[in-house]
Image (tube, rainbow, N blue to C red):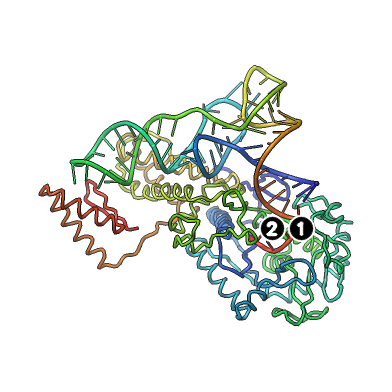
Amino acid sequence: MVQELQLYNTLHRNIEPFKPIAAPFVGIYVCGPTVYGEPHLGHVRGPITFDILHRYLLHLGYKVRLVRNITDVGHLTNDSDDGDDKIAAKAKLEALEPMEIAQMYTNSYHAMLMQLNVLPASIEPRASGHIVEQLEMIETLIQKGFAYSSNGSVYFDVEKYSETHDYGKLSGRIKEELLAGSSRRNLEGQNEKRNTADFALWKKADKSHIMQWNSPWGKGFPGWHIECSAMSAKYLGTQFDIHGGGLDLLFPHHESEVAQSTACFGTNPAKLWMHHNMVTINGQKMAKSLNNGILVKDFFTGNNPLLDKAYSPMNLKFFILQAHYRGTLDFSNEALQAAEKGLNRLLETRETIEKLEPSAISSWDVDKWVKECFEALNDDLNTPILIAKLFEAVKQCNSTFAKIESLSAEDIKKLQNFFSLFVFEILGLQKEEKSQSNKEIEFLELLIELRRNAKENKDFATADSIRNKLTELGVTLKDSKEGTSFTIN
RNA sequence: GGUCGGAUGGCCGAGAGGCUAGGCACGGGUCUGCAAAACCCUCUACACCGGUUCGAAUCCGGUUCCGACCUCCA
């Protein structure tokens, strides 16, 4: 290894060396989706970001346990008394079982991960399957005096916690202000709480509520932060290496997780907190409330007014990887198409490397290039830099192929290995083969053959006619020394 | 209102006190029957105003604009 991996820790607002608690084992908890809708563009960034981390740690030889939860219960539409569970609300609307909805969208989510070539999680726990663990934590919190029940619900006592701990340290909030209540809301429905900053651990459910469980405080359902605390502790221990999620979860979700877990287990849950930034559209965050989301499946079909055309999963992935995970990334057709062309060029280089002829000496330094690639990854997973380096290799490789530069046999081998390592194993890109039926390919080959004959007879009118017709049908012919190849849109 | 970020060339995006990424587009060229594709070359930017410095896009102060979080969110 060239140097050690450094990652930005939200907790310290700093880039710090990554040191596992119990190497070679690494425990990672990532906040997964709430499965009440089709995955949209925003859902794509988290899995991709943490997949790079996952893949790189595996490459470095760590034994990684990646836990990514599926939230199928618990999110409230608001924090007031008449709060409704999102999944239940949708179930009523569609007259389906809540679990059916959750399963349906879980399947969509998994399909998306597969298309994006994201490695599967080690454990994918569901909130609804861990009600017992959540209840246990809540009871412990009450026993320790950090939580109180009120009218069938249970709330975390932020003021009590703040006497001995720093509520707000993760998100950089000022606890006095949180306790005083924000100026922006503070409406009714807060009367059950001792303080507006308190958050629900358990919510009482009324009879119309579909998803509900028995508890010592009556029928209800868990608050939306407790599942992550309960499940991460169960599968990774009360303290683990990395907790990841979107920046929008920083407050209140992660802050509350820190508070609950710390109060319950006496230890800060994660040593390192990683947050990826949002995807924006015309400079604005994509959000349910703004109604500007684009579904992931729309990208693959192009079926959305905001999209000029269809974009492949790898195209989308590469587009995301070209920006650093901590910065916002603005979506546009132009940028997506730029990424598409770049990706093709990058991917084609793999074949070019195979065709390289060795020289006695190398005119460029492959070792230095490899070192710089690792440095980019080690620097808080700087994929844009890594990609820039990969394009340097593309250029050198093409120039070597054109005999402008030269590489020794040993360096060619090295280039092959590391290029594949970075592009395919660590970035997790893959070549998308469009599967065509054999018949179609045979027809095409026949046409290409006819055109070749026409060309040989200098019958360019016929040759061009074939080419133009095929272009209209979405088949692009490429003539080269070796013959004619085709691509199908 | 509070807190925290950001403003980089036609577009997307790195970087971060002197060596001034990368992709795409544009322009020029090689190749080609012609194209397309591919390949090569080219294109010198850091919101504004002050200040620190031999030197600032990078540091400091101020200004303007934008965004995020504070409410479900990836």
Residue that mark 2 sits on: A249
Residue A347 rendering spot, x and y as whole percentages: 39, 50
- Determine crowd level at label 1: few under 14, some 14-19, many 20+ residues with C-alpha closer than 10 A: some
Quadrant in which the C terminus of chain A appears = bottom left
Q: Which of pointers 2 and 1 indicates the residue nearer the eye?
A: 2
Task: Report in which chain the residue with disc 2 lies.
Answer: A
Q: Locate residue A9 relative to residue A110 in the image: left or right.
A: right
Q: Nearer the viewer, residue B66 or A404?
A: B66
Q: Which residue is at 58% across, 66% downward?
A: A122
- Determine crowd level at label 2: few under 14, some 14-19, many 20+ residues with C-alpha closer than 10 A: some
Q: Type of residue at label 2? A: Leu
In the rendered structure, find residue A407 and report the number of the disc placed on it: none
Task: Report in which chain the residue with disc 1 lies.
Answer: A
In the rendered structure, find residue A268 and report the number of the disc placed on it: 1
Q: Which residue is at 27% across, 67% downward?
A: A438
Q: Type of residue at label 1? A: Asn
Residue A185 rendering spot, x and y as whole percentages: 80, 58
Q: Locate residue A58 relative to residue A489 in the image: left or right.
A: right
* In this view, A188 is above or below B6: below
Q: Locate residue A360 relative to residue A121 in the image: left or right.
A: left
* In this view, A25 is above or below B62: below
Q: Is residue A71 in view from this perspective?
A: yes
Residue B43 rendering spot, x and y as whole percentages: 45, 29
| Mark closer to the chain start, 2 or 1 | 2
